[in-house]
Amino acid sequence: MVSQRANQRPANAVRISGRRLCRGCHCWATRTGHLDDYPRATRRAIDVAEDHAHLHEHGLTDQEIARRLGMKLDSLHRALYRARTYESATA
């Protein structure tokens, strides 16, 4: 008889959502220099802010920009806030 839990992920296999790797694979990729082989699952806030600035110069509203970037309006605003916070912390 097959266990009902046979297809579940082990409890110690914690996902690191940034690159969709489990903790062990993320540690291995970092240690061996292969982390760049696994692309990020999300966009950096600074990249979103640059795209926003470019599209805003062409007269698009935040709603249109969010739609064009494939994100919700609230997500766009959070990314812009994170980018501003990062810029002020590094300045």
Image (cartoon, rainbow, N blue to C red):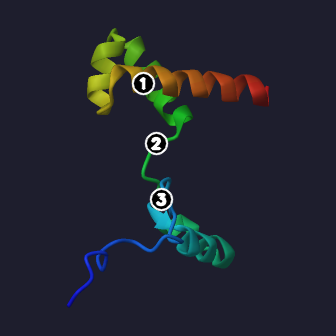
Question: Marks 2 and 3: in contact by CB < 8 Å?
Answer: no
**Mark 1 sits on what residue?**
76
Residue 12 in the image: state x and y as whole percent.
54, 71
Residue 39 in the image: state x and y as whole percent.
45, 59
Report whether 80 appears left or right of 73: right
Task: Label 3, secondary structure: give it.
Answer: loop
Compare marks 3 and 2 and give the one earlier in the sequence. Answer: 3
Residues packed near mark 3 inside 10 Å, few (<14), some (14 to 19) or many (20 plus): some
Task: Label 2, secondary structure: give it.
Answer: loop
Give the answer, above or below, for where 55 lies relative to 46. above
Q: Residue at x 39, y 71 (%)?
A: 9
Observer-nearest residue: 87 or 82? 82
Give the amino acid type for the residue marked by disc 2 in the picture: Arg
Compare marks 2 and 1 and give the one earlier in the sequence. Answer: 2
**Mark 3 sits on what residue?**
19
Observer-nearest residue: 48 or 24? 24
Q: Residue at x 26, y 25 (%)?
A: 67
Report whether 82 appears left or right of 56: right
Q: Residue 2 is drawn in which quadrant?
A: bottom left
Give the answer, above or below, for where 57 lies relative to 86. above
Q: Residue furthest bottom?
A: 1
Residue 87 in the image: state x and y as whole percent.
69, 26
Residue 19 in the image: state x and y as whole percent.
48, 59
**Mark 2 sits on what residue?**
43
Observer-nearest residue: 4 or 64? 4
**Mark in front: 3 vs 2:** 3
Q: CA distance from mark 3 to mark 1?
A: 20 Å
Give the answer, above or below, for where 82 lies relative to 19. above
Give the amino acid type for the residue marked by disc 3 in the picture: Arg
